[in-house]
Image: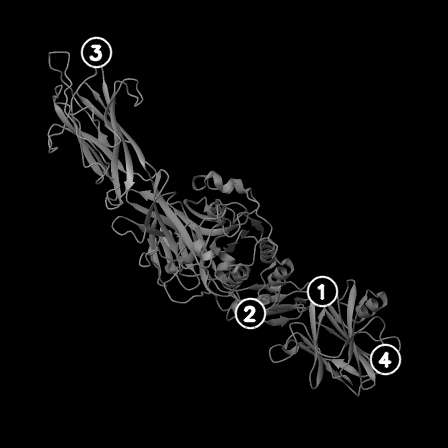
Amino acid sequence: MLRPLLYLVALITLAGAKQTLTASTELDISSCPITIYGQRYEQAFVNYTSQNLVICFKGFYGSGTKDDCILGPLPDSKNAEFDQFQRIPLLETIVQYNVPTIKTRMDCYLSISYQHKGGYVSSAPSLDNRVMSEPTANNIPLPVSCSDTFKDNQVTVTNTPSSRQTRGYLDISGCRHSGAVYKPATEVNSPETCFSLTCDEDLVLKTSSCGPMDRCLGNAALYDSIFNPKLDLVCTVTGPALIDFHGLLTSVRDRCTYSLLSLPSAPDFQVLANFQERHRKDVSFLDSVTLRLDGPGVQIHLKQGGRVQVNDAPLSLSTSAQMVHGVELSKDLTGVTARVSVSNFTIYVFFDGYTMQIHLQGPVGSALHGLCENSSRSLADLRVPESNPDSCLIQYNDTEESMINCTKMTEHCNLLKKEPFASCDINPEPYITACTTTLCSYPDRDALKCQFLEAYARTCKLQRNATLVDWRSKAKCSFCQDRTCSDHEFCGEKSVGGDNRCFCRAIFASKYRDQNALGDPTVCNQTSGSLTLVNCLLEDEGLDYIALHLKDPTCRGHMDEETHLVTFSFSDINRCGTEVMSSNNQIIYQNTISNHNSSSSIITRKDQVFIDFSCVYMKEAMKAFKVRSSSIIKVSTSGVWNYTLTMKAYTDAARTRPVDSNTEVRLDEKIWVELKTEGLDGDLISVVTESCWATNQESETGSLRYDLIKNGCANPADPTVTVEGNGEGTSSYFSFNMFQFSGKSGNIYLHCKLQLCIKQGNSCIPKCNGARTRRSIRSRYEASALISMVWTN
């Protein structure tokens, strides 16, 4: 058993190397720490007041810090010496003789000494929870004494002129609870509240009180605890860390779903934890919690931002409890709580978007399953197969973060050893380990360093009913609440201690960042074009989508409220400043997303954005139909920008009587063929029928060929051919007298080659010179021929 001891003595000289303390000084005593009533310290703060030299362990003595201090008489001059010594067996014997309860080795001790009224006073705290002071070999009788109580968490050293005492000892070992200190072998009972506290000889603190399911009888007897003992357990999941019901720690490194709690006595109930990545692909975080009821039938999802979904339907909550499938759901400023009673258990599930805690109360001896019951089990055994894609197990290795200061993060995590956290008697070590392990491999962002403090504080509240006062302001912590992020996002800090926003998950963002892109490729559809950008990527670049627009400043992006994707688009109805240009064999519709405004200022202090996107028509298009006896078949193709091109035959000039499978077309009978497009902007584009020809083979390059249209004009060798409206718009037609190849009775295939043309005056209309004369193509056969035509629209 280790005991703290305060040993005060008058000195003339001190041995050893000294550090002179002439002003307020912070001392590093981590190599020889001190523990005062159960609180361990690795720093000491020495300063002078008008009446005292003061040694404190929480900070410099003043209006804000007056506890855990040693107050000594003021030196003759503001000058004291600090030194550190290794084990001295003789000194150890003296101390153990004067304080029999000290039985262990004294491996080191510290000394702060100074001159007072001609003599020296030395206060020496030592390793292994002892505080003491020692005289030198040449001492004079300087009367000193110290109080045998630890009033207001202070030890006061005073002169006692009537005494010849030269040494003083004070045992300051003990326990702490809710800010109060207790000496060893202390027992406190409150029959009125059924609260009891014991600080035993080994400095182990034990407390008991009535739980929420108990009834205090007023005689310090916990009726239900004796005759109906119950479990009162807490399991915590925060970041990648899980601390189970027994205080054991494990970590999840993948992005899968795991069973946290299930009850053999209630097989249809299960609590699941879903993990996802955030800024880094190789570190996973708790992302959401699922309560599974009636097997897979009903699932209640607790998500970031206080969102709740029942199956896939969103649920609006308030502070008033709402019953949903037997689960009591409520929401406040801290998060969402689900309360369910099942199989003699009362289970509370809390989730604030970062941390989940299961508080379970129920009969002792009941079987429990899941990671919360036994975190040492293989993760594979508790992975939920139907909720996990194969990709959730893929491991990534991101570049190591060069800016992580592990020493600083460790200091922060060790705040759990200090007040106000130290007033809670729950072991903080699993939380400290989880905190340091995570923050030494992941950047200090999104209030991450506060999650572990918050988790510990809530555990103290749940299991000890202890409220840790004002810890958030001391740790400078804030959390996301009421911010809805999409599935590819998570909520985090926009700036340290500042506002929050939705960030892109690392795996989702990597496919864009690898291509230096802010969104998906351009989508071209008939006479419209659109470009979709990812808002969380825009915000990563410091861009506000509201400030972005197309070349026409009135055309701005539209954000999808669910996905947070921002779409910019133009169409033939509103071109939004789209420019049309011709390049080689392409017609290009081009626009730009920018944040440029039309102000007259010649300078700007904001990043300028210019994102070009375009849609492309291929100028050439091939179209063919086949005449088989009496059938026409249309074959359609499309360019980069899709549009519809149809070829249709008629038996009248007004094109009101289409040729169908029942139409009889005789040789030398005139038919009209219409080439028509849909999906082109007729104000900007014209279609030119460059050539049409017939073959007796399906291939347009068949060896037997007859031309009907050449170079956009009717074949002057065939006076039956007439071309109308060619190049004037998005459709044209031509006519000719039906024929067949001489000496051939098989299929006839008609092919047409078309060009797309940007209108520039009449430049799209072919110039056809010379008059045409009609001639007839007569059949060698006297009997009439019947031709049926089939085509597709």
The circle drawn on residue 12 is 4
Please state which of residues 316 and 422 is positioned toward the viewer in this rendering: 316
Q: Is residue 174 above or below residue 781?
A: below
Q: Secondary structure at mark 2?
A: helix
- The amino acid marked with disc number 2 is Lys
Q: Nearer the viewer, mark 4 or mark 1?
A: 1
Residue 657 in the image, given as x and y percentages of width and height = 11, 30
Q: Sequence order check: which comes first, mark 4 or mark 1?
A: 4
Residues under numbered marks 3 and 4 in contact, where contact means CB atoms less than 8 Å apart: no
Q: Is residue 112 above or below residue 652?
A: below
Residue farthest toward the right in the current orientation of the protein: 138
The residue at which mark 3 appears reads as 743
Graded by Cα atoms within 10 Å as few (under 14), some (14 to 19) or many (20 or more), the crowding at tag 3 reads few
Graded by Cα atoms within 10 Å as few (under 14), some (14 to 19) or many (20 or more), the crowding at tag 1 reads few
Residue farthest toward the front in the current orientation of the protein: 770
Q: Sequence order check: which comes first, mark 3 or mark 4?
A: 4
Graded by Cα atoms within 10 Å as few (under 14), some (14 to 19) or many (20 or more), the crowding at tag 2 reads few
Q: Secondary structure at mark 3?
A: loop
Disc 2 to disc 1, C-alpha distance: 23 Å
Residue 269 in the image, given as x and y percentages of width and height = 41, 46
Q: Secondary structure at mark 4?
A: loop
Q: Is residue 135 above or below residue 555?
A: below
Q: Nearer the viewer, mark 1 or mark 3?
A: 3
Q: Sequence order check: which comes first, mark 1 or mark 3?
A: 1
The circle drawn on residue 747 is none
The residue at which mark 2 appears reads as 474
Residues under numbered marks 2 and 3 in contact, where contact means CB atoms less than 8 Å apart: no
Graded by Cα atoms within 10 Å as few (under 14), some (14 to 19) or many (20 or more), the crowding at tag 4 reads many
- Residue shown at 55% from the left, 69% from the top: 474
The residue at which mark 1 appears reads as 30
Q: Sequence order check: which comes first, mark 4 or mark 2?
A: 4
Q: Quadrant of the N terminus?
A: bottom right
